[in-house]
Amino acid sequence: MERNMRLRMTLAATVAAIATLAAASVAQAGVLYSFAGPTGELPTDVSITKSFSGAAGAAQVAFTLDGYASLDGQNYYEDDFTLSLNSTPILSATFNLGGGGGDVVFFAPGGASVNNISGNGMTVTWAGGKVLISTPLNLLAGLNSLTFNYTALPGPGHAGFQGTGDEGWGLRDIVVTQASGGVPEPASWALMLTGFGGLGAVLRRSRRQAVLAAA
């Protein structure tokens, strides 16, 4: 009885270890692109494009958006941020980064995590700020491009371009990641095969012991 219990525990532990190894191998994420930056202060109405290669399918980009001086949220002096993947917009928003106005996400069909850590509220502080952003991507096979753009909304309804003496923006800590896919790497295959081999040996030994006990 005790030997059978030890055997069942050994089998369960072996199966669990193999399953964990397989899941970890499949889910492993790789960095496709990284840019520590910072870019420094840029005027509005300027775009930055970053290109990288990946596999077709789901991925993720995380980055920090820097605001300088009185970059505005939703108000008369509004400045809007847009992120595009392969020329298609995937995120559009405005943030109070020193210039007052509200934080508004206008467009994020794939979902996005947006955290304005500046603490400016609705007030004009001229202190700039930072927004932490993460959003999913749907990549093409091969070369992909992310375009980051900030636009000062034009008149007559808004103030239009004001220049870096009043407001500016920049980027840092851009990281694009993608899961390695559903096929384990060769080293993982070798470890899993070793595990299955050990499991088979335990089962064969169990059968021999059962036959001897019956005899």
Image (tube, grey):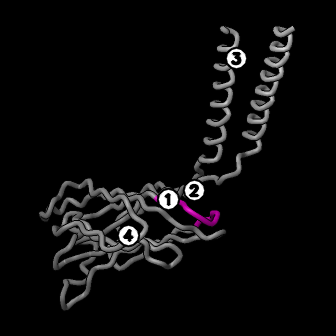
Q: Quick one: SS at disc 2? A: strand
Q: Quick one: SS at disc 4? A: loop
Q: Position of residue 114 (x, y in %)?
A: 33, 59
The image quarter containing residue 193 is: top right
Q: Position of residue 12 (x, y in %)?
A: 64, 25
The answer to the question of whether label 3 and label 2 lie on touching residues, with beta carbons closer than 8 A, is: no
Q: Residue at x 64, y 30 (%)?
A: 17
Q: Position of residue 88 (x, y in %)?
A: 48, 78
Q: Is residue 123 above or below residue 7?
A: below
Q: Which residue is mark 4?
A: 108
How far apart are labels 2 and 1 at the CA level? 6 Å
Q: Which residue is mark 2?
A: 178
Instruction: Give the residue type at disc 3.
Output: Leu
Considering the image in quadrants, where does the C terminus appear?
Answer: top right
207, 79: nearer the viewer: 207
- Region rendered in magenta: 52-61
| Mark positioned earlier in the residue sequence (3 or 2) | 3
Residue 130: which numbered mark, if any? Answer: none
Considering the image in quadrants, where does the N terminus appear?
Answer: top right
Q: Is residue 130 above or below residue 163?
A: above
| Mark positioned earlier in the residue sequence (4 or 3) | 3
